[in-house]
Amino acid sequence: MSVPTVETMPSSVPGSAMPSMSPGVRPVALAAGDVTLSALIAQPSGPPRATVVAVHGGGMSAGYFDGQAHPDVSLLALGARLGYTMVAVDRPGYGLSAADAPSGQTLAEQSAALHAALRHLAGRAETGAGVFLLAHSFGGKLALTYAACQAGDPDPAVPPLLGLDISGLGRDYAIDPENGPDPHQHRHWKRNWGALRFYPPNTFREAEGLVAPMPPREQAEALQWPRRFPVAAAAVQVPVRLTFAEQELWWHHDEDTVADLAAHFASAPSAAVDRQPGAGHNISLGWAARTYHLRAFAFFEECLARRSAGASVTP
């Protein structure tokens, strides 16, 4: 029996305007409880190995994962070629949902919305072995919150969570968070991007179509993260990989801090922290994007192999 495909979102839908997309990438809408989330999807030519749901950071949008400045940049295009169903969602308060949730949502509310969106997706597209979350910056806060919430009784209508790959997120800010939750303030340009040499020509022109206002409730949530991280991390029960860019300036990530971060994932089967040379905070838009993305997929493949090995063990 064939699985229905996710319907392409008409370009005339209010709030659905999106920048140009890579071949094979198309816009869709996912029902997510009280809101409808706009998203980008790219599907493999055959049955998917698994599904990767990409979650953008504060003040960005789903298009962050389909960068157009160079063919090597798009996570969505690469993942589909490697056999994964790829979905990049606009978090609540962004894209299509901005009209219904102009103030945004709390992390708990966003987690519930993501859960509902995955249920909608699973009924309309093949998802393979389950779902990986690949998240950037504030999106990593949502990924960890969601993973912590999934530690209880699983919902059989939602694909199982297989692992988390998060970049640009730590626990303790390298700045006073009271002065910096809005990433689009001019003084934070270098924190977001790092050195100009890290990015292909036309990156910043293309990025103009990716940025969006950071919802007020999201800014308030950002201030609470240092105390919420330990609670969320302790509840995560899937493998975790964190990546810090060479010029990551939003977070403390010295060796002692990194070791402490990994130690908080006491219930996870594994927790690794990597560093990405030649990159700024917005890793997935730079020259290092392909390297970072391939490392993420290698991590996903390790998770799938571990899962297969565990399933093959007989009592």
Image (cartoon, grey):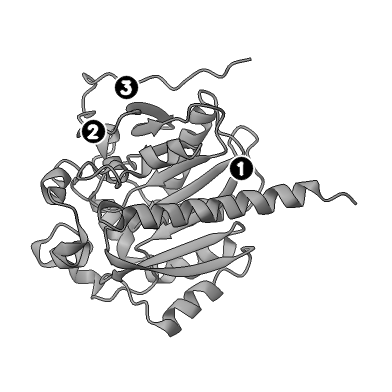
Instruction: Look at label 1 and name its amino acid.
Output: Pro
Task: Name the element at disc 3.
Answer: loop
Q: Is residue 133 above or below residue 244?
A: above
Pointer 1 with pointer 3, Cβ within 8 A: no
Judged left or right of residue 180, residue 9 is right
Examine the image and state in which quarter residue 99 appears: top left
In space, the residues marked 1 and 3 are separated at their CA atoms by 26 Å
10 Å neighbourhood of mark 2: few (<14), some, or many (≥20)?
some
Residue 233: x and y in percent read: 52, 65
Residue 232: x and y in percent read: 51, 62
Q: Is residue 236 above or below residue 264?
A: above
Q: Residue at x 32, y 28 (%)?
A: 27
Residue identified by numbered label 3: 9
Task: Name the element at disc 2.
Answer: loop
- From the viewer's perspective, is the residue at label 2 or at label 1 nearer? 1
Judged left or right of residue 307, residue 35 is left
Instruction: Look at label 2 and name its amino acid.
Output: Ala
- From the viewer's perspective, is the residue at label 3 or at label 2 nearer? 3
Instruction: Look at label 3 and name its amino acid.
Output: Met
Q: Residue at x 37, y 39 (%)?
A: 76
In space, the residues marked 2 and 1 are separated at their CA atoms by 31 Å
Examine the image and state in which quarter residue 68 appears: top left
Pointer 2 with pointer 1, Cβ within 8 A: no
Residue identified by numbered label 2: 99
Task: Name the element at disc 1.
Answer: loop
Residue identified by numbered label 1: 160
Question: Can residue 139 be seen at all in this image of the molecule?
Answer: no
Q: In the rendered structure, find residue 108 and report the number of the disc placed on it.
A: none
In front here: 222 or 39? 39
Mark earlier in primary sequence (2, 1): 2
